[in-house]
């Protein structure tokens, strides 16, 4: 297992690589990541949303089922390789605080990846899910509506704070995945924190790019304006804080004194 200092060294090297990716490569990998996260969301709807009686009698267990099936998205991102905005919120911070990488690399990556993630998530929501009627009937459609309505019913501050919690755990999951040296270890290390944030009910901006647009496509009484201003913006800002300030900054500060050697 890699120790925290070794993990930060790996994070630093990966951030330098990400900063040198061509725009096309970054964007394609970002589309894939958005799709992978959406696949996790779709699986969670099918498994947990398909158990309404269990939800009525044991809501905690259904939340666990939802959380337990969702992490396939982040596992795919890490194991097969893709660009996820929320993970990248933490990657660049250790290099920035040690002045080993320009801040322009980070903002360029974030912009491209956020846009690509949105494209990938929308593709799964509209083409793979809506057009195939996978969730068009009860009990799945009820779950789709309930998820989206719940996510757009909170105040800006509540969604922002839930966004912090979500990406704090997501970035810790990625950190743990880097600590593991084999695929099985990486999968379990990623699964546990992601399961936790989903079961708790925190807000992940990229996942919400799938959940809420899917509900809109399926006829929910939610507008795109409501989605963007009531959920996406505060969740995104919270995710940035959770990843950058609660993971990248403290671990980069505490364990980031290293010599960066990298072969691109």
Image (spheres, helix red, strand yellow):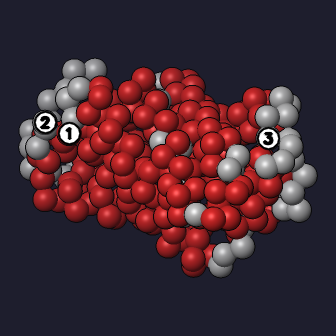
In the picture, residue 160 is in which quadrant? bottom right
Q: Is residue 223 above or below residue 116?
A: below
Query: Residue 18, image x and y in percent?
Result: 38, 33
Q: Are marks 3 and 1 in contact (CB under 8 Å)?
A: no
Which marked residue is nearer to the observer: mark 2 or mark 3? 3
Q: Does residue 27 appear in this view?
A: no
In the rendered structure, find residue 1 and report the number of the disc placed on it.
Answer: 2
CB under 8 Å between callouts 1 and 2? yes
Task: Measure how far apart labels 2 and 3 are at the Cα level.
Answer: 41 Å
Q: Quadrant of the N terminus?
A: top left
- Give the percent coordinates (x, y) of residue 217: 85, 46
Name the quadrant containing residue 58.
Answer: bottom right
Residue 101: where, in percent of width, then height?
A: 28, 43
Q: Quadrant of the C terminus?
A: top left
Secondary element at tag 1: helix
Q: Secondary structure at mark 2?
A: loop
Looking at the picture, does residue 102 appear above or below residue 242?
Answer: above
Please tell me which residue lies in front, 94 or 157: 157
Residue 245 vs residue 262: left or right?
right
For the residue labelled by badge 3, is the local secondary structure a helix, a strand or a loop? Answer: loop
Q: Which mark is residue 179?
A: 1
Name the residue rendered at 35%, 34% in the picture.
187
**23 left or right, relative to 19:** right
Residue to which mark 3 is pinned: 135
Q: Tell which residue pokes out farthest to the top in this image.
A: 264
Q: Earlier in the sequence, mark 3 or mark 1?
A: 3
């Amino acid at each position: 297992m890699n120790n925290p200092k070794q993990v930060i060294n790996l994070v630093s090297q990966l951030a330098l690589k990400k900063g040198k990716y061509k725009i096309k490569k970054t964007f394609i990998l970002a589309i894939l990541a958005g799709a992978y996260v959406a696949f996790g969301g779709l699986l969670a709807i099918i498994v947990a949303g398909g158990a309404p009686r269990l939800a009525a009698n044991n809501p905690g267990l259904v939340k666990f089922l939802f959380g337990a099936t969702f992490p396939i998205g982040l596992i795919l991102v890490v194991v097969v390789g893709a660009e996820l905005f929320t993970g990248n919120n933490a990657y660049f911070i250790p290099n920035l605080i040690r002045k080993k990488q320009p801040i322009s690399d980070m903002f360029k990556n974030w912009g491209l990846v956020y846009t690509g993630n949105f494209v990938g998530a929308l593709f799964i929501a509209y083409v793979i899910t809506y057009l195939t009627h996978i969730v068009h009937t009860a009990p799945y459609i009820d779950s789709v509506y309930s998820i989206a309505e719940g996510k757009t019913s909170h105040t800006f501050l509540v969604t922002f704070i839930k966004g912090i919690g979500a990406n704090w755990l997501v970035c810790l999951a990625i950190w743990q995945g880097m600590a593991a040296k084999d695929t099985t270890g990486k999968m379990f290390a990623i699964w546990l924190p992601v399961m936790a944030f989903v079961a708790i009910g925190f807000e992940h901006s990229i996942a919400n790019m799938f959940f809420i647009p899917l509900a809109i496509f399926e006829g929910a009484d939610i507008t795109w304006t409501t989605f963007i201003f009531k959920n996406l913006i505060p969740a995104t800002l919270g995710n940035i804080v959770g990843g950058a300030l609660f993971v990248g900054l403290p671990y980069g500060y505490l364990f980031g004194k290293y010599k960066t050697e990298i072969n691109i």
